[in-house]
Image: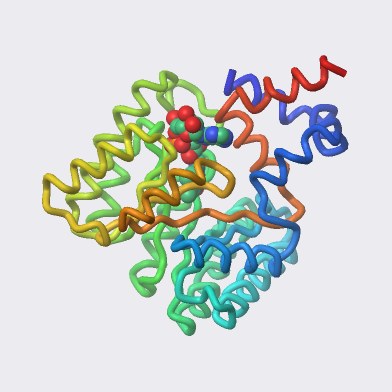
Amino acid sequence: MRALILKLAHHPSVERFVRGSRLFRGLVRRFIAGDDLQTALRVSEELAQRGLLVTLDNLGENTTTVEEAQAAKETYIAMLRAIAQSPAAESTNISIKLTQCGLDLDVDLAKRVLEEVLDVAAEHRNFVRVDMESSAYVDRTLDIMEAVFSQRKNTGTVLQSYLRRTPQDLERLLRLGMRIRLVKGAYLEPPEIAFPRKSDVDRAYVEQTERLLKSGLYHAIATHDERIIRHAQEFAHREGIPKDAFEFQMLYGIRRDLQESLAADGYRVRVYVPFGDRWYPYFTRRLAERPANVLFILKAIFRG
Ligand SMILES: Cc1cc2nc3c(=O)[nH]c(=O)nc-3n(C[C@H](O)[C@H](O)[C@H](O)COP(=O)(O)OP(=O)(O)OC[C@H]3O[C@@H](n4cnc5c(N)ncnc54)[C@H](O)[C@@H]3O)c2cc1C
């Protein structure tokens, strides 16, 4: 079902339908904080008041010109400056995508953009997370991260447990001392590259969570899977790992109850808050994660 939704979503007529249909508007609003940075900052402040941390994501991926990559850089820098002026400055960082920085055009361009963004983040003592995209980008992302991290420590990236290669990548990043966000993985990948069975992904995720928690570095366990979250809590407790030695991360609009209850229990919880008008690819990945979201809409369509 997940693969089917991701495949269908690429079809231009499906995209036109989703973008134009009122039926999807409520769901889009559930997952996307708003169209502009001001709205996203207001959301950050509200979340900060509820004891939650935030990472802001300016939606967009796969830039095709140098000008677009430069524009993405300016947007990221503007975000960092605006965060520094906002009441949620202490609790908000940003997440960025290297394809938005021009990775498809030129690896060196994407690396230079990242370095400039990190330098501005460092002026404001902030941190930049580099999201992980589809498997075609993993080598280039890790190579850029390794090169950049040798000079600039205010960054970290993401590993996806569904990839068969992840145990090796995880050891590579731990040797560097880099902070990792662990996710299950959101893209459509062939079985040679990613585990097709959810039970294998979940098992890998649990093993990798334990490895990260025991590493002594500050990592992010990014999942809404309550069973895995409980396991991480119990494991950390058993190993004597303090609650502030890692953070949980969840997406805006998903399991708000769990976000708040973990924060109330003294855990650090960061919410990934996407904003902007280029929401379609992000939105379709959220739909595919939970086919019930789509069934809900189909029922509404057939009900007339
Ligand atoms: C902070 C954060 C950052 C991320 N960054 C990346 C990244 O850089 N690269 C990448 O490939 N992926 C990223 N992801 C997405 C991730 O790979 C998964 O696709 C996503 O988190 C769903 O998996 P899960 O761990 O919640 O587990 P699942 O087993 O998919 O879900 C567990 C439970 O969570 C709830 N849930 C999960 N998804 C939804 C949804 N869409 N709608 C409603 N309920 C839902 C349901 O109750 C479900 O039963 C990120 C996720 C988070 C939380």
* Nearer the observer, 146 or 154: 154
Looking at the image, residue 15 sits to the left or right of residue 123; the answer is: right
The residue at 29%/46% (across/down) is 170
Q: How is the image coloured?
A: rainbow
Looking at the image, residue 229 sits to the left or right of residue 234; the answer is: right
Residue at the limit of the structure toward the top, as seen here? 302
Q: In the rendering, at what x and y percent does residue 258 appear?
A: 43, 44
Looking at the image, residue 177 sits to the left or right of residue 261; the answer is: left
Q: In which quadrant will I find the C terminus?
A: top right
Q: In the rendering, at what x and y percent does residue 173 appear?
A: 30, 54
Q: In which quadrant will I find the N terminus?
A: top right
* Nearer the observer, 117 or 22: 22
Is residue 135 visible to the viewer in this orientation of the structure?
no
Q: Determine which quarter of the picture holds residue 33.
A: bottom right
Q: How many marks?
A: 0
Q: In the rendering, at what x and y percent does residue 100 appear?
A: 64, 56
Is residue 193 visible to the viewer in this orientation of the structure?
yes
Q: In the rendering, at what x and y percent does residue 164 appear?
A: 36, 30
- Is residue 171 placed above or below 13 in the rendered structure? below
The residue at 64%/19% (across/down) is 4
